[in-house]
Every structure is written in C-alpha cells, then in structure tokens.
Image (tube, coloured by chain):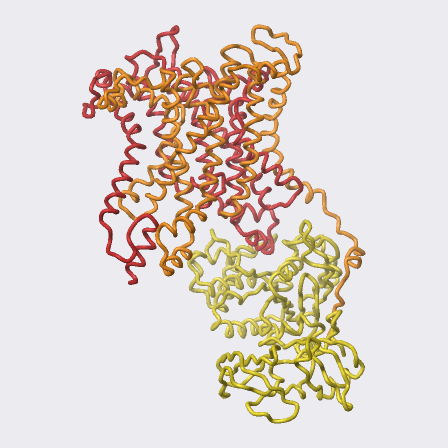
C-alpha cells in the first residue's frame, strides 16, 4: 500500500457533508423517559400558581365567594407587625441553630475521625436523632420537659431550676425549640463532615509532616480548606431546611406562647387554617417564599459549584 | 521518624497523638470521654423514651424520676390491641395501629412510585445530554428545598373539590414531592459512577441499548436503589405537614396520631410513650443497617463516601 | 473478513467536535493501527465503527454496504475496551457467554460450552471461568475481555488500547501473542494505541490521528521515513526528533542552514537528497527535523563541520542512551550506544552535516519533498 496523506480539512469542507438525520425516537428518548416523573411532580406545581392567584383575592373559609383584591393582602402584610415579627423569628431561629450545629457538628466529626474505641463503637448511632420524625422527637422532648415528672427538669432541679418553663414561657421558648433542633440536626452536619474527613487525601498531610509543620498550621492551611466544601454542603442544606422549619415548632407549642415562635411556615399555617383566612395566609407565605427562594437559589447554585469540587 | 510513629500519626489524623513522642494517654482518655459525653447527649433521650414505654404510669409520674424500675408490657398491649380514647376536647378515637399501617402503606407506596418513575429519570439525566437537562435537574432539586406550605394549601382546595382529601392516592401523589427528588438525585450520582463502556460493550455483544441497561446497569445500581429508597421511605415516614393538611381519619399517619396524643391527660403517658417508640423504632433499626449509604443520600448525591 | 470504510465522517457531542471529516478504508484481513495521543479521538473512531455511536455527518460502510443506520448490536463486530468493561455482576464465564444470549438463533448449550472452553484455553484463562470479575488481575481481565470478543465470529475486531494498563514487562510478550492471534484468525482488526512502538511492530498500515483529524495513513515504513507533517514525525521515535526553525542559505555551492534566532546553530546540509530539496528553498525559512540516531558526535574535535556543545544531561536506558547537548542555548538530542562513557558538563562535538533531514513547511507543517 502506498502512503496516503490526508489533507487536513477545513470547517467549510466538513459542512459540505450533509448531516445524518436523527430519528424521532432518538431525539425524544430522554424526554420520554423523564416524562412520567416530570408530569407527576409537575402537576403538583400547578397549585403553586394557584397560590399566587388566591393570594390576590380575599377568599375566606367563611366567605367562599371571593373577589379579586390584587395586592391589598400584600400591602397589609408588609405593614403588619406580625409579619416582621415572624421574619425576625424565622431568621433568628435559622441562623443561631445552624451556627451552633455547625460548630458542634464539626467538633464531633473531628473527635470521631480517630481510632479510639468509643469512636468506633458509637459512630453508627450518630444517625439516630436525625432519623426520628422531627415531630415525634418534639413530643419526646415535651414528655421529658414536664415540671411534674420530666427527667430534664429533674436534672435541672440540681441547679434550682426544677420549674423551668421550657416552651410555656416566652422567655425560654426560643431556647427550648433551638435545643430540640440542635439535638436533632447536629448529627447531619457531623456525619457529612466526618465523611469529608475520611475522604481527605493523605499526601498533603504527610508532606506537611515531613516539612515539620505544627499541628495548628496543618489544621489551618490544609485540613480546613480541604474540608470547606463538605462543611459548605452541610450548612447549605441545614440553612434552607431550618428557614422553613415547621414540625418542631408546631409540635412544641404551635407557635406559642402567643406568637413567640411564629416562624413563617407556622404562621402561614395558622393564618390559613386556624384563622380561616387562606388568602392572607397565602400572600404571607408567598412573600416569605420569595425571600427564601432568593436565598435558596444562591445557595443551591453554590452547592452545585461545591459539589464539583468534592467529586 | 519510625514506621510505627508514622502509622499512628496517619491513623489518628489531626487532633490526636503527638507525632514524635510516645502515645499521649491524656489525649486518648480525654477524647474518649468527650465522645462518650457527646453520645450520652444524643442517645439519652431515646433510651429514656424506650424506658418510659415500659414503665407503669405510676413509675412515669414518680418524682424523682425512676432510673430503675420493673418493666411492664401493658403500654404496648394497650396500644396495639385496643383503641385509645383521648378525652379533653370530646372523645377522639385514636386507632394507633391503624396509623402504623397507614404510614407504612403511604410511605411504601410513595417510594414505589418514585422508584419506578425516578430511576429511569435519573438514568436519562445522567446519560443523555439534552437541551434543558440542567434546568430539569434543578427543578427536581428545588422541590426538596421549597416550602411545603406554599404547595399544600392550594392542593388542599383542589383535593377537596376532586375528592382526594384523606385518600391514599392523594397522599401518595403529594408525597412525590418528598421522595422523587431524593431518588432522582441520589440515583443520578450512582449512575454517573457506572462507566458507559459497560452499556457499549453489551451493545457490541448484540443487545439493543435498552436491554443492555437492564442486563448490566440495573444489577450494578441495585444497592443504590435500595439505599435511596430506604432514605426516601424514612423521610416519607417522618413527614408531618402533608399528612396534617391533606389527611384525616382514613389516612392518619403516625405523626398525625402522635400529635393528637399530646393533649391527652396524664394517665395516658405510658401509652403515649409506647406509641412514640413504635413510631421510631423501625426507622432506627433500618438506619443502623443501611447507614453506610446514607451520607450520599443525605447530601442528595453531592458527597460520595 | 470485512472491509470497513468511513466516508467523511464527523462526530459531534453537543458543541464538541470529536471527529472531523475522516475518510478511511481498511483492506480485507488487514491489521490497521490507529495511533494518536490521548484525546485525539481514537476511541470515538472505534465506537463509530462498532456502531455504538452514529456519526453526525458522513456514512459508515461494511463490505460496501451502508450500515450507518444499523445499530451496533446488529453489526456483528467485537470490541475490547481500554478499561476492559467486564460486567461486574457476572462471573468470567457469564461474561464470555453474554454474546450468545443476544443471538436470534442461539447455539445449543453444548455448542456454547465447547466454544467457551476453546477460547478460554487458547487464552489460558480456563482456570478462571468461575471467578468473579473483581478478583482478577489486570492481565487476566485483559484476557477475559479478549475472550469475550472471540467467542463469536465477528466480521472484524476493534481493540482499544488493550495493552496500556498491562505491566511493562508482560507487554512485549502480549504484543506477540496478539499479533499471532490476529494472523491466525485472519480477521480484519483495528487496533488503537498511543504507543508508536506497538503501532510500528503490529500494523499493516497506520492511521495517525490528532484532534479528530487524520494526519496520515500509511505503512510503518512510510510513517517513519516519510512523515506527512511535523506531528507525525514527532509521534514516532524516541527520543523525539529534534526540530529547528532555519533559513536556507547557499555558501560555496553548499547549502547551509542558519538558525533563525540569533544564528546560534548553523550547520551544513551535506546529505545529498536533503540538499537537493533545499536548493529550491534558498532564502526561505524551513522547519528541519533531525533524528537523534542520525547525529554523529565525539568528545574531540574531529572535522570542520563539528559544532561544539556541552553535555547537559545523560540518560542510559539499558542498551541505548541519550545525551542532551546544549549548543549556545539550543539543545539537540543524541542517541548513543550503551558502551559510551559520558560525563555531564563535558564538551562534546556534534556533526549533523551527514544527517538525512526531514523538512517541513513552516506555515502548513507539511513535509517538503
């Protein structure tokens, strides 16, 4: 065979060759496969748009024929003290909870990332608080927080606080609900960070050791940066979830006493079903949702970015 | 540095032993104590609760609380075999074991639907590069992050009109908002891990593409399906809000029934504890068994152990 | 036995152009090697031939028949993959039996068993048949992968870098085995590699591929001695060919090549054939390639053409070695025998005046002849 040389082609030459037709099946295959899942879930989205519609009416359970009031509900909400109060509650709750969970969780993860006996024995149980239904958890804690027979009050009696009111007093309600949230969700962060610690490559640490770096230096400049994506993922999940916490607060006191713990989902529920004013309740929820949607979208985009670093 | 010291250092990572000296006993004991303290914090309430469910009502109400007591099965007998009344606001019958079945069937049904529809969807998202892929994937993810109330209130009205309130199909459908995103995102990460070459090799062997997927890919991702199904099941089981708004006596889940308990009078605390324990015990057992896979699930596929 | 042909095939994945307007045709029973660096598109090309991918543009033919629209499972080809793609939930035997399950007219159990044993013993894996795939070593996996493709009688074989993950020591022996197999079976084989030694030793013809485009198709001799462009010249040969940008001048009837930067490395082109070509390029710039084995050197000044330089680096690879010589900032690689005593930092004189020159146009990169 003699040598055949290929003259390198030009884009024009490439395009002279006609494109091969793609069969209808090939083109639509992914959409067809996805279709059922999308439809099932997508149909549930229609109510979302209905929400927006209803929120611009004055629909009440006691007044089923309603009329359009456009943005009157929204105006009312934005100028009501109750709304701003609930915004405060929502954000206070979320940020304090996540901050404490993160610190506590990261410390726990470090402690468990060793070969100590207790670590190996007990790590499998770390999941447990997380796996119980938050509502059930709350009821569980309520039983332990009774001033008459609750075991927690028993412990507190040693420091003279047997009558600690927990969720019945406005002063201690937030503390109580934060306590339950932190107990339930710290393991989430601890587990994710622990997975991260175990997945860290050995080489940087060995190199640092050979270089004679101090422990603090290694921690600050190697461990922490490598761990950050994992912590970030955990924090993003927790933040988004705690901003819309319902079960724990509702289970503990239905938002009370009064409106001390009315974060936005609890308040939204109460407006709609307890006070029977779904239109206002919806408007309220939508406003809150917009706030949280903006935050969540940023976080989820960041999540996607961070996820690539971790894989 | 000797081989032994180096091994100790690598194994014990950051916060622990000194590298060039001998083992630091203080650090080891301190660490173990700290870990024990932390786990006492996390596990005590669960253990206490289990204990409470075996106590007689007198033991429960005793002060100081009893750490040692004679266990009794009365609470469990009462709750499993007879219906319970809650006095207070009228007499509400709470058939607790019925709740157990409701929860089981609804959660199981929801997960089944999600697996049947979601695994193919996850495959499509992973393997095909089509227009709108990232948007669709993001849409599924956003369901996990959206506020349920926003969707649940209008669904309440619609369901009322079409008679889906308090029905199994209604709840199973709405539960897809919880279970489907999890299955899709977790399974997507599992499918991503399987090299496409497996399917290509099977095609070259003579099988059409879809058969190749069933023959080769499915067995490989089976553990992933099991793990994600389990995690989705747990989240469905634990749900409260959907059941609260859209369910009632015919579909009263465990969470709903438990909430009704809480207004019970003192005499019912023992039975309540038994109810609570029955609510969470199956889940705890499952999670110990399958927990290896949960990190991937909890982070929606972002972190692979 | 089959002639496989691609005509003007282009393959796009979304916006990425993996294969650009490739046309090639194999001969019946030929052993064709596709040679190229990572990312060149070699695997994609194989998969186009296998029918796993359908080309965005262009057509695929087998024995003259247009098979572009025929899906891969109906083309009756066999392929091995770089990472073996052994089905992880199947045993070795089940892997090998997999193709039979897809056949319309399945052979009887006995026939299947016979074939499996035949191939297994030929590849010396008969003792591994019941093992799980994850218990095998790399070399064993490679054989199983081969076995799976050989239990059928495919029209042609496609091998995707079968030896790249095999131990260096075993590679040589395996290469011989593969060659033997291919000739025994006399089936058209298309073999992908990035290793030019494999290409040169196994191929009837070589297709050099880069960035999805064919650079050259030819037999090993042509690829080595008459590279179509600089890329092909560089890809074959170790150490790499030395390349310089020079301008051509004439002095006293002889051609002299002057280094375009700072005139540091000037040398006479006395090799007759090369000089003849260069006569047509006086006053112009060319790219000049000199193979390391064509460089004469000595540690004493021998003749007027020798250029003085310094030994920068010396590598000994067993029976051969390489000296990296620096001359006024330029470097040249020189191939040596193992019995030469070389000291780093010492002066050395290189003489390239007799070396056959590989000449390339500086703009197009194509060889000048």
Reply above or below: C106 against C270: above
Q: Which chain is red?
A: B
Residue at the front extreme?
A: C262
The percent coordinates of residue C290 (x first, y second) are 65, 80
Seen from the viewer's position, the closer of residues C266 and B236 is: C266
| Figure quadrant of residue C204 | bottom right
The percent coordinates of residue B191 (x first, y second) are 53, 45
The percent coordinates of residue C9 (x first, y second) are 73, 58
The percent coordinates of residue A2 (x first, y second) are 74, 76
**Residue C215 falls left or right of residue A42:** right
Reply above or below: A5 against C76: below
Seen from the viewer's position, the closer of residues C267 and C42 is: C267
- For the point 57% across and 29% down, the residue is A293
Seen from the viewer's position, the closer of residues C119 and A270 is: A270
| Figure quadrant of residue C352 | bottom right
Q: The orange chain is which one?
A: A
Q: Chain C appears what colour?
A: yellow
- For the point 50% across and 88% down, the residue is C340
């Amino acid at each position: 065979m003699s040598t055949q040389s290929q003259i390198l082609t030009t884009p024009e030459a490439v395009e002279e060759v006609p494109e091969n037709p793609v069969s209808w099946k090939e083109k639509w295959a992914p959409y067809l496969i996805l279709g059922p899942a999308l439809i099932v879930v997508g149909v549930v989205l229609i109510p979302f748009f209905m929400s927006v519609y209803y929120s611009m009416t004055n629909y009440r359970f006691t007044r089923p024929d309603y009329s359009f009031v456009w943005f009157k509900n929204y105006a009312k909400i934005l100028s009501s003290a109750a709304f701003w109060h609930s915004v405060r509650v929502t954000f206070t709750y979320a940020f304090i909870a996540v901050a404490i969970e993160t610190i506590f969780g990261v410390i726990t993860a470090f402690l468990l990332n060793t070969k100590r006996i207790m670590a190996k024995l007990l790590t499998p149980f770390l999941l447990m608080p997380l796996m119980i239904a938050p509502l059930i958890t709350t009821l569980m804690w309520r039983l332990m927080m009774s001033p008459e027979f609750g075991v927690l009050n028993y412990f507190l009696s040693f420091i003279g606080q047997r009558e600690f009111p927990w969720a019945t007093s406005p002063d201690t309600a937030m503390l109580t609900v934060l306590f339950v949230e932190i107990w339930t969700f710290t393991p989430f962060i601890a587990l994710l960070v622990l997975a991260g610690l175990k997945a860290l490559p050995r080489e940087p640490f060995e190199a640092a050791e050979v270089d004679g770096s101090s422990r603090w230096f290694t921690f600050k400049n190697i461990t922490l940066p490598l761990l950050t994506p994992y912590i970030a993922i955990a924090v993003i999940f927790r933040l988004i979830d705690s901003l819309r916490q319902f079960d724990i607060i509702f289970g503990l006191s239905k938002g009370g006493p009064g409106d001390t713990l009315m974060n936005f989902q609890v308040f939204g529920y109460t407006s709609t079903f307890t006070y029977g004013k779904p239109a206002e309740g919806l408007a309220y929820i939508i406003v809150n949702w917009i706030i949280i949607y903006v935050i969540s979208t940023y976080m989820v985009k960041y999540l996607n970015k961070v996820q690539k670093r971790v894989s | 540095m000797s081989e032994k010291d180096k091994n100790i250092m690598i194994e014990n990572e950051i916060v622990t032993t000194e590298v060039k000296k001998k083992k630091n006993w203080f650090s080891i004991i301190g660490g173990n104590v700290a870990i024990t303290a932390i786990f006492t914090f996390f596990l005590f309430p669960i253990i206490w609760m289990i204990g409470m469910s075996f106590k007689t009502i007198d033991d429960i109400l005793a002060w100081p609380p009893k750490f040692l007591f004679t266990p009794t099965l009365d609470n469990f007998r009462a709750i499993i075999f007879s219906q319970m009344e809650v006095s207070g606001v009228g007499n509400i019958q709470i058939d607790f074991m019925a709740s157990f079945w409701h929860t089981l069937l609804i959660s199981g049904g929801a997960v089944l639907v999600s697996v049947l529809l979601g695994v193919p969807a996850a495959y499509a998202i992973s393997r095909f590069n089509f227009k709108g892929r990232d948007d669709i994937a993001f849409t599924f993810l956003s369901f996990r992050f959206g506020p349920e109330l926003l969707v649940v209130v209008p669904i309440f009205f619609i369901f009322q009109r079409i008679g889906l309130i308090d029905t199994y199909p209604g709840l199973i459908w709405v539960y897809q908002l919880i279970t489907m995103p999890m299955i899709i995102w977790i399974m997507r990460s599992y499918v991503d891990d399987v090299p496409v070459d497996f399917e290509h090799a099977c095609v070259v062997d003579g099988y059409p593409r879809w058969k190749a997927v069933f023959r080769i890919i499915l067995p490989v991702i089976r553990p992933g399906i099991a793990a994600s199904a389990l995690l989705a099941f747990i989240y469905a089981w634990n749900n409260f809000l959907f059941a609260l708004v859209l369910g009632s006596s015919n579909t009263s889940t465990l969470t709903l029934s438990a909430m009704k308990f809480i207004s019970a009078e003192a005499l019912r605390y023992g039975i309540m504890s038994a109810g609570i324990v029955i609510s969470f015990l199956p889940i705890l057992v499952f999670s110990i068994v399958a927990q290896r896979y949960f990190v991937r699930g909890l982070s929606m596929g972002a972190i692979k152990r | 036995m089959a002639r496989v042909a691609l005509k003007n095939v282009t393959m796009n994945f979304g916006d990425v152009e993996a294969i650009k307007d490739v046309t090639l045709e194999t001969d019946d029973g030929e052993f064709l090697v596709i040679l190229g660096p990572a990312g060149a598109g070699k695997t994609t090309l194989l998969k186009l031939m296998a029918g796993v991918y359908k080309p965005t543009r262009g057509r695929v033919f087998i024995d003259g028949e247009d098979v572009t629209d025929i899906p891969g499972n109906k083309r009756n080809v066999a392929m091995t993959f770089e990472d073996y793609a052994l089905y992880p939930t199947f045993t070795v035997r089940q892997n090998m039996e997999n193709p039979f399950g897809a056949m319309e007219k399945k052979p009887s159990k006995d026939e299947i068993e016979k074939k499996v044993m035949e191939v297994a013993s030929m590849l010396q894996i008969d003792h591994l048949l019941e093992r799980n795939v994850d218990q095998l070593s790399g070399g064993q996996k490679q054989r199983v992968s081969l076995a799976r493709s050989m239990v059928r009688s495919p029209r042609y074989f496609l091998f995707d870098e079968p030896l790249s993950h095999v131990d260096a020591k075993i590679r040589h022996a395996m290469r011989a085995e593969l060659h033997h197999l291919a000739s025994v079976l006399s089936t058209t084989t298309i073999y992908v590699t990035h290793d030019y030694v494999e290409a040169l030793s196994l191929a009837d013809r070589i297709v050099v591929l880069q960035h999805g485009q064919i650079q050259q198709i030819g037999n090993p001799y042509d690829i080595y001695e008459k590279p179509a462009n600089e890329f092909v010249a560089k890809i074959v040969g170790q150490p790499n060919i030395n390349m310089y940008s020079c301008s051509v001048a004439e002095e006293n009837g002889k051609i002299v090549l002057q280094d375009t930067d700072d005139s540091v490395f000037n040398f006479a082109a006395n090799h007759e054939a090369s000089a003849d070509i260069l006569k047509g390029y006086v006053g112009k710039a060319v790219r000049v390639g000199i193979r390391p084995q064509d460089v004469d050197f000595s540690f004493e000044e021998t003749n007027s053409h020798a250029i003085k330089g310094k030994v920068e680096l010396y590598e000994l690879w067993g029976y051969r070695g390489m000296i990296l010589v620096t001359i006024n900032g330029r470097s040249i690689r020189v191939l040596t025998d193992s019995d030469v005593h070389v000291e780093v930092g010492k002066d050395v004189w290189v003489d390239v005046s007799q070396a056959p020159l590989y000449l390339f146009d500086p703009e197009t990169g194509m060889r000048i002849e």
